[in-house]
Image: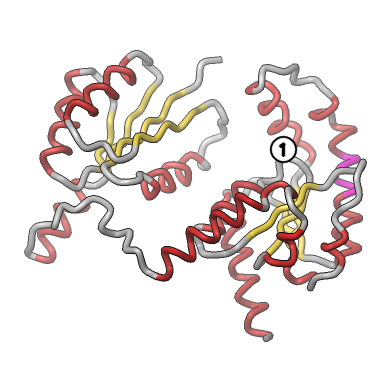
């Protein structure tokens, strides 16, 4: 099946608009898409080069954020010329604020990313979450602000990265019936551990789609109901032994689950 292609063009990193787009995608029941980000686009030639590639696929949509008006204008013209459906994210926002503040925008790409202490903390948290993703190194359990545990396809990794963007250092650990969880999980404060679970039906759907995307048969044991129930029961037992908080992520967007976790962390910190 051919993927729907969502392209992001930006004269900065494009991270802000990517977060907005991913948030919007959660409102649709589909995994049949790819997001391609084109960062630091600085010339009309680059715009044309990207547009030519985008135009080859009819199932494409293009979002762009250019703070310089001349680049935004050129992008708008190029979209018409290449017959591409595109959405200008910044212009209407900048124009309305310009009217409110009675001044022209400085048109400096990436000016919202000041290299302050908060920025460095966020980068540090992101690097930490990548380093200790998927149980790669159990030493991260003792260093993390929070540890996410759960079986495959319970949103551990995307949640880790989302929370890292909130300056929270996250380690995540997969649970399998065939292996014992790291001993470090049983030596730390259980309030730092969040167990993630999902419904058997949703896991079956997600795993089948995952197998399809990998070009594998969607009827394998991994996506089978019996295997899923076995894993869920095992994970439930582990979480009960740990005495940790458990969140069912079924039908929840990443942002919803993250908000629950952040609120929970706030409650814990108030106890200290």
Rendered location of residue 176, percent (x, y): 86, 43
Q: Nearer the viewer, residue 7 or 184?
A: 184
Q: Nearer the viewer, residue 261 or 126?
A: 126
Left or right of 106? Residue 55 is right
Q: Is residue 159 above or below residue 88?
A: below
For numbered disc 1, what is the local secondary structure? helix
Q: Nearer the viewer, residue 77 or 205?
A: 77
Rendered location of residue 30, percent (x, y): 56, 31
Q: Is residue 229 above or below residue 115?
A: above
What color scheme is it?
Answer: secondary structure
Residue depicted at x 21% and y 37%? 42
Residue position marked by numbered label 1 in the rendering: 202
Left or right of 170? Residue 71 is left
Q: Using the rendered view, name the quadrant where residue 193 is placed.
A: bottom right
Dominant secondary structure of the magenta stretch?
helix
Residue 230 is covered by the magenta coloring: yes
Residue depicted at x 27% and y 17%? 52
Left or right of 9? Residue 189 is right
Range drawn in magenta? 229-234
């Amino acid at each position: 099946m051919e993927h729907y292609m969502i392209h992001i063009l930006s004269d900065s990193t494009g991270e802000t608009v990517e977060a907005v787009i991913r948030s919007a995608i959660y409102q649709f029941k589909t995994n049949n898409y790819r997001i391609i980000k084109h960062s630091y686009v600085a010339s009309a030639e680059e715009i044309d080069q990207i547009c030519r590639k985008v135009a080859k696929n009819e199932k494409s949509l293009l979002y762009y954020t250019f703070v310089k008006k001349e680049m935004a204008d050129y992008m708008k013209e190029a979209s018409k010329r290449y017959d591409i459906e595109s959405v200008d994210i910044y212009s209407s926002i900048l124009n309305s604020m310009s009217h409110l503040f009675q001044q022209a925008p400085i048109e400096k790409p990436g000016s919202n990313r000041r290299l302050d202490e908060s920025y460095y903390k966020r980068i540090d948290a992101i690097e930490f979450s990548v380093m200790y993703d998927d149980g790669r190194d159990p030493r991260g359990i003792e260093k993390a602000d929070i540890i996410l545990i759960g079986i495959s396809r319970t949103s551990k990794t995307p949640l880790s990265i989302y929370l890292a963007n909130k300056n929270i250092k996250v380690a995540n650990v997969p649970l399998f019936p065939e292996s014992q969880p790291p001993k470090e999980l049983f030596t730390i404060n259980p309030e730092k551990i969040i167990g993630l679970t999902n419904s058997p039906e949703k896991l079956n759907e997600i795993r089948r789609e995952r197998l399809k995307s990998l070009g594998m048969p969607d009827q394998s044991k991994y996506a089978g109901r019996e295997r899923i129930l076995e894993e869920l029961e095992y994970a439930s037992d582990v979480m009960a032994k740990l005495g940790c908080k458990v969140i069912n992520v079924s039908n929840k967007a990443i942002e919803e689950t993250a908000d629950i976790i952040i609120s929970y962390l706030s409650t814990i910190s108030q106890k200290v």
